[in-house]
Amino acid sequence: MTTTAPRRRIDRLAHWRRGPRLGSAYYNEYLPDPSRLAIDLQLMREAGLSVIRVGESVWSTWEPREGVFDLEWLTPVLDGAADHGIDVILGTPTYAIPPWLQVKHPELAVVRRDGSPVPWGGRQEVDYTSELFRGYARRVIETVVGRHGRHSALVAVQLDNEAGLHLIHNEQLVARFRGWVADRFETPDELNRAWGLAYWSHRISSFDELWAPAGNTTPAYDLAWRRFQAEQTTAYLAWQAEVVRPLVAETTALTTCIAYGRPAMDDVAVGATLDIAGGNAYAIAQDALQLEREGAGDQWFADDVPQLVLLADRMRGSRQEPFLVTETGAASIGAAHQTRPPYAGQLGQTAWLLASRGARLVSYWHWHTLHSGWESHWGGILGHDLRPGRIHGEIADIAAQFAAAEDWLADAVPDAQVAILSSRDAEWMMDFEPPLARADGSADPRSFARIQRSFARAVLDAGLQAGVVDERQLPDATAMLARFPIVVAAGLFCLADRTMDVLVEYVRRGGVLILGPRTGVADGLGRVRSVTAPGVLRAAAGVRHDEFAALSGEIALRGSGPLEGVEGVASGWIDGLVPEGGEVVAGYRHPHYGRFAAAVAHSFGEGRVLTVGTIADRAMLARLLAAVAPAPDPAPPVAGLAGSMTAHSLIGPRGRVWVLHNWSPHPSSVTTARAAQDLLHGGRAYPSGETVTLGPWAVAVWADSALA
């Protein structure tokens, strides 16, 4: 009889389990005097940094001429980091290609929708689906990681950087797309029916007749094209993972740096190829971080607090696990005109917000403010004079705070009562045909984000904690209810039949469902359903709608029933709700739209549905959610929060930890509802009923006596 030895468990997340760490991108090769390495490493330790990211942006330094490599310039950095107890993330240098490769193969440039190539001179200009390019990329990856991949300081490899910037229209890829479509439909006639190609004489008799995406006007085609493009990005990073894995230790984690707004990025699919998700978490600072502010929300950074919270929750949602913040702002972010150094305390607020939502690394971009290049106004931890200043000191304070709370934060999991259901498909479809307009009347391609952030902001304002769940991650109704007593489904224009069925059963079993505008209108292929909206959710919601309108301005709202006397405004869109057994809780003050309900609540089975047919203003939407949502559970250890404060929590082996923020330039006070222990001030005990004041832009971190 033979026995098989148990498989040895490989823990690639061991370096990220003890709670949040601080780090920085470090480019010794960019410094005017690289010999100051020892000074930098010592200053890093004094700031409490324990991780650096290196090497990802300098292919032309690694390989200055074709096939000629310079590999040893990084060795002193790695050795020095190890000597100072600093771990290293090594990046594969494939997102910024060297000039010699651009000159030799100009055909590798990405071709844009209009047929023009992306000009060289920036970064991410290359078609990474090209087998020719991948040959060069494989060689530099294998050479660089082969040399340094097993260094004792190395704990992770970052695959490429911020992939998915372009929708690639190169001829070879468009041809591959036709084959991709053919693989999914048995015959052209099946495709004709599925995409509705009788319209405008688009029926095809051969897949070779499928037109190029640049001229496409068919929504289902565009959804397929966007899925295909995202699959290329995922496949590219998965390919890099296959190249890198044999070159590093078994325990070395593979990650990437996700820029969540990239058009060809599917963070959930990419996350499945990684050991731990990583990405950018940028926020503009100063007055934008007052909780009362509502930002524009159409940037690559968060410009208000609810957007930053939603971004952090989305980062955790990439794998439904802890994540790495591979880049966040230090002294400032962006170009010169965006230079807004954080007010004193705001760096700590951002770091603690990210940690409270599951970040195991908060890494600043970058160590020193650059002296040349496009990003020379993007403020690092050190300024242009390379001397430690206020930012360095504040980050040292954050490190001390993280250390003080480390035992409580180890393996801690963020609490979440609300699932914000998300869908890249819905986002792509609203990008193709936006339902909302900008202030100038033009179509807003970020309509999905506008709808989602309105509801996410209401969740935060209602005192609830959320997690982002992609439609593809949706479990069955029983499992969903066990994890989230509330689900928000807003702006999800296209939903698979299974998703709709799960949501119905979720409510039947006792869940609270918040339905927002334009949800479930189309099916999983992007075809508008030929049933009265909201389709199979109609009976559960106690409402129907068959009229809709894009609003050119605001319309007054008035509450009714439990919200009698509450006033507000609607904007953006109206799904004309007609109650079918549901209770009207808000309506319109308008000679035409007054015939419709703005919000309808309905009990179904053991649960309840709130359908909101418009984008209500911030206060009204929070009141609507609070009217149907159960009380926050867990409840913060305070008797109410001031209007400038938020509370987020994590639970770990030692109990629950609360992170309280005062997003204000003015002090705010709270009264404890039960005993708590202040983890940042020597374990000071607060009895129930004590008034505690948080200073301007301050954070409090308390252990909850209820589970301590």
Image: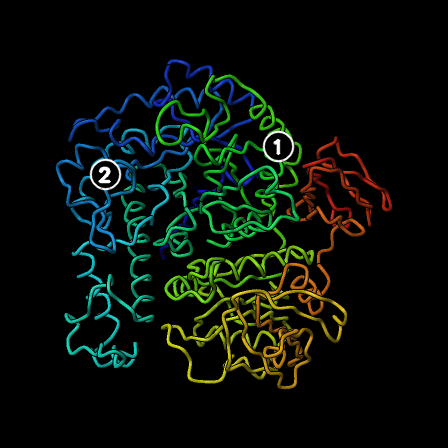
Question: Which one is in front, 422 or 218?
Answer: 218
* Mark 2 Cα-neighbour bin, 10 Å: few <14, some 14–19, many ≥20: some
Residue at the outermost right position:
689
Q: Are marks 1 and 2 in contact (CB under 8 Å)?
A: no
State the residue lying farthest toward the left.
104
Q: Which residue is mark 2?
A: 120
Residue 141 placement (x, y as % from top left): 26, 37
* Amino acid at dot 2: Trp
Q: Position of residue 477 (x, y in %)?
A: 55, 72
Q: Quadrant of residue 634?
A: bottom right
Which residue corresponds to mark 1?
Answer: 343
Relative to 131, residue 433 above or below? below
Residue drawn 27% across and 80% down? 199
Mark 1, residues whose alpha carbon is within 10 Å: few (<14), some, or many (≥20)?
Answer: some
Q: Viewed as shown, does residue 19 lie left or right of 434?
A: right
Location of the C terminus (image quadrant): top right
Tell me where residue 165 appears, x and y as whole percent. 33, 48
Position of the N terminus by quadrant = bottom left
**Dot 1 or dot 2, earlier in sequence:** 2
